[in-house]
Image (cartoon, rainbow, N blue to C red):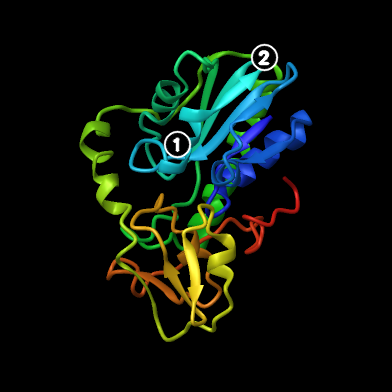
Amino acid sequence: MILTFSATGNSYHVARRISDATGIPMVDMGAAERYHRHLYDAKGEDVHLVFPVYYHGLPAVVSRFAERLEVRNPGRVVCTVTCAGESGAACEMLQERLGDRLTVDAMYDVRMPDSSITYSDVFPEPDVEGILSDAEARVDEIIGSILAGESGDHRTMASTDHVDEVHPLYKEARSTEPFAINDRCVECRICEDVCPEGVIRIYHRKPVWDEPECSHCMCCANLCPKAAIEYGDGTAGKGRYHHPDYHVRVLGMPLRW
């Protein structure tokens, strides 16, 4: 099985490529966590975990899911992460959460366009196209390694140099209080539909972030078709990004999972 969490489609695309190459079906990690689906029978198939790197570590939803995950009859266990820069210690953190229930046999990382629009603007389109082209070649390498049954650490951007400094900042960044809508909102409810954690609710036809914290995936802001969602002053005037293969209603209402 391929357990994947994706907010704006980078990890979804990588997981789909692996699924197409191996014939192993995909499972939406966000939905599984929402509905408390933590027990699986792999029936001897490899277990892949594919997700983005947040603050050099695990997204909160992935951390919670991994702590509860139980897989019977697993094959090899493979961790593949997507990141805009360093992949940090996300795979090591995953192993910590899995404990002795599963042992990660192989680790990979892939550079993808940045979607963390609270801290930086999206890349110009030519840069995005170049990064995505390089990513396709990297995913080809990863698939070849997976099909060859290789184990070990095959990451090219892993580093623990800044993890202790950066990852603790994630807790503060996960506050939903700064989320707000601007006057471009057309009451389409897409933000409620796509939120992987079900945090957004519509009250009086407007979105409300109904929990004090979320994983800060920025799916809502990046997939809003009118760029009507802001996070404090951090997203004002910035572009939005989602992977070109990732359509607005994929997450939560998937066509290929």
What residue lies at 42% left-to-right and 45% top-to-bottom? 84
Q: Nearer the viewer, residue 252 or 136?
A: 252
What residue lies at 54% left-to-right and 53% top-to-bottom? 196
Does residue 256 sit above or below 64 in this rendering? below
**Left or right: 195, with 157 as reference point:** right
Report helix, strand or loop for mark 1.
helix
Q: Label 2: which residue?
A: 149
Instruction: Tell me the tag on residue 64.
Output: 1
Report helix, strand or loop for mark 2.
loop
Q: Residue furthest bottom?
A: 183
Q: Nearer the viewer, residue 27 or 248?
A: 27
Q: Nearer the viewer, residue 112 or 221?
A: 221
- Amino acid type indicated by mark 1: Arg
| Residue 240, horizontal then vertical, whole percent | 47, 66
**Left or right: 150, with 112 as reference point:** right
Q: Quadrant of residue 33?
A: top right
Does residue 240 sit above or below 96 in this rendering? below
- Amino acid type indicated by mark 2: Gly
Split into 4 quadrants, where in the image is the N terminus? Answer: top right
| Residue 9, horizontal then vertical, whole percent | 58, 52
Mark 1–mark 2 Cα distance, whole angstroms, equals 28 Å
Mark 1 and mark 2 lie on one chain; the one further toward the N terminus is 1
| Residue 237, horizontal then vertical, whole percent | 36, 75
Does residue 117 sit above or below 77 in this rendering? below
What residue lies at 28% left-to-right and 39% top-to-bottom? 167
| Mark 2 burial class by Cα count in 10 Å: few <14, some 14-19, many 20+ | few
Q: Residue furthest right?
A: 23
Q: Mark 2 and mark 1 in contact (Cβ < 8 Å)? A: no
**Left or right: 39, with 92 as reference point:** right
**Left or right: 230, with 147 as reference point:** left
